[in-house]
Image (cartoon, rainbow, N blue to C red):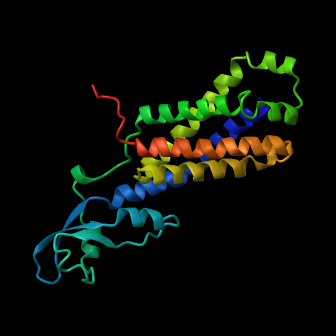
């Protein structure tokens, strides 16, 4: 019970630590996204160029993004140009209708991923898999377990952890403008790894068998949540009213 509360607090702490960084990356992406009208230095004719906003967001953590063009109406014929119009592009304002903000967070894939992770946990800790070893590792008797398994709060807290983690993965995908199974798994692994590192002090004294059982469940849960949230990012959407 205390371990679950520790996980929730660590997950909230990690989210608060990552929030300024992700907001800054989102601001850089918003600032440099969109097509911009420039006069090509070669022929002085109008051309529409796009700044590589994703590269700028990835390299601008320290306040000095590496700026470059990623598209132009004269490409691919003149793709090897010196990008002398970059200064014009930075001064030109991108049309508001082509600016891209944070992608929406779709709730159905997140809730489905959280429910799948919770069901996996129920099966993983059942009598048919690792419950006997878990009881030995914790030192619970059958009578004590019979009382605990009817408590509602541990089940609700476990479900809350799964939902919170799934929303964290969905939020990371939305801020980073990514989707897909591999991207979802990557975000889940990054968030899960940060959570494990943050909670390493609290879990260091737990029994080895308990850590092994929970580590196996966490790895599978990360893969399931990341695959579902990333793979169904824009394929399972609530209808708009």
When the figure is inspected, residue 16 is found, relative to residue 151, above or below; the finding is below
| The image quarter in which residue 16 lies | top right
The residue shown at (11%, 82%) is 43
In the rendered view, does 127 fall on the left or right side of 228?
right
When the figure is inspected, residue 55 is found, relative to residue 26, above or below; the finding is below
Q: Nearer the viewer, residue 157 or 144?
A: 144
The residue lying furthest to the front in this view is: 128
When the figure is inspected, residue 126 is found, relative to residue 100, above or below; the finding is above
The tally of labels here is: 0
| The image quarter in which residue 149 lies | top right
Q: Position of residue 102 (x, y in %)?
A: 38, 47
* Quarter the N terminus occupies: top right
Q: Nearer the viewer, residue 232 or 239?
A: 232
Q: Position of residue 163 (x, y in %)?
A: 56, 33
* Quarter the C terminus occupies: top left
The residue shown at (47%, 68%) is 59
In the rendered view, does 221 fall on the left or right side of 109?
right
The residue shown at (31%, 67%) is 51
Q: Position of residue 3 (x, y in %)?
A: 76, 35
Q: Position of residue 80 (x, y in %)?
A: 26, 83
């Amino acid at each position: 019970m205390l371990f679950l509360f520790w996980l929730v607090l660590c997950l909230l702490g990690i989210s608060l630590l990552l929030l300024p960084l992700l907001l800054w990356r989102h601001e850089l992406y918003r600032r440099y996204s969109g097509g911009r009208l420039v006069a090509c230095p070669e022929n002085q004719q109008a051309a529409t160029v796009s700044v590589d906003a994703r590269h700028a967001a990835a390299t601008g953590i320290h306040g000095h993004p590496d700026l470059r063009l990623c598209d132009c109406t004269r490409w691919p014929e003149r793709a090897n140009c010196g990008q002398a119009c970059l200064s014009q592009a930075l001064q030109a304002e991108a049309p508001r209708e082509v600016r891209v903000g944070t992608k929406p967070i779709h709730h159905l894939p997140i809730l489905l991923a959280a429910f799948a992770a919770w069901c996996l946990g129920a099966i993983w800790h059942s009598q048919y898999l690792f419950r006997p070893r878990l009881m030995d590792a914790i030192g619970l008797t059958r009578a004590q377990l019979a009382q605990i398994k009817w408590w509602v709060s541990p089940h609700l807290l476990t479900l809350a952890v799964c939902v919170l983690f799934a929303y964290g993965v969905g939020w990371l995908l939305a801020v980073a403008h990514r989707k897909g199974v591999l991207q979802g798994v990557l975000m889940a692994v990054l968030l899960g790894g940060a959570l494990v590192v943050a909670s390493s002090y609290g879990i260091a004294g737990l029994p080895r068998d308990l850590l092994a059982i929970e580590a196996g469940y966490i790895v599978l849960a990360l893969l399931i949540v990341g695959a579902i949230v990333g793979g169904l990012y824009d394929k399972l959407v609530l209808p708009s009213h």
